[in-house]
């Protein structure tokens, strides 16, 4: 139960991070006032004046959004015969 809650919480955070990167890829400067300020906040490199390319932002957005989706699909369609998805099935002398 706790594992499911933590998994859902982390999936939500990764999805939000992915959405932010997608917005930044399309030129939205939220939460900064302009692109230079956003680049300094996000990238954190001295002297940076503009955000990384749209391709780089969308790649990160896809990566962040795909990982929780994959975990959800795997959990829904592929049930493990184990008691929980991480332990070995019970054998002789184990319950």
Image: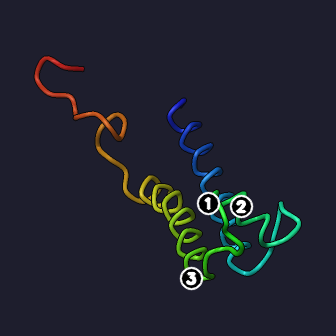
Marks 1 and 2 sit apart, C-alpha to C-alpha, by 6 Å
Label placed on residue 8: none
Farthest residue, direction right: 33
Marks 3 and 1 sit apart, C-alpha to C-alpha, by 19 Å
Label placed on residue 45: 1
Q: Position of residue 10 (x, y in %)?
A: 58, 45
Other-residue count near label 3 (Cα within 10 Å), few / some / many at <14 / 14–19 / ≥20: few
Residue drawn at point x = 55 percent, y = 68 percent: 60
Q: Which one is earlier in the sequence, the residue at label 3 or at label 1?
A: 1
Other-residue count near label 2 (Cα within 10 Å), few / some / many at <14 / 14–19 / ≥20: some
| Picture quadrant of residue 53 | bottom right
Which secondary structure lies at badge 2?
A: helix
Check disc 3 and report the residue beneath it. 55
Q: Are marks 3 and 2 in contact (CB under 8 Å)?
A: no
16 to the left or right of 73? right
In the figure, 54 relative to 43: above or below? below
């Amino acid at each position: 139960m706790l594992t499911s809650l933590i998994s859902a919480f982390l999936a939500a955070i990764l999805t939000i991070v992915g959405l932010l990167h997608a917005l930044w890829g399309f030129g939205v400067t939220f939460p900064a006032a302009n692109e230079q300020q956003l680049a300094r906040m996000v990238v954190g490199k001295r002297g940076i004046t503009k955000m990384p390319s749209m391709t780089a932002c969308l790649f990160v957005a896809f990566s962040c959004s795909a990982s929780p989706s994959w975990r959800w699909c795997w959990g829904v369609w592929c049930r493990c015969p184990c008691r929980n998805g991480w332990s070995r099935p019970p054998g002789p002398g184990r319950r």
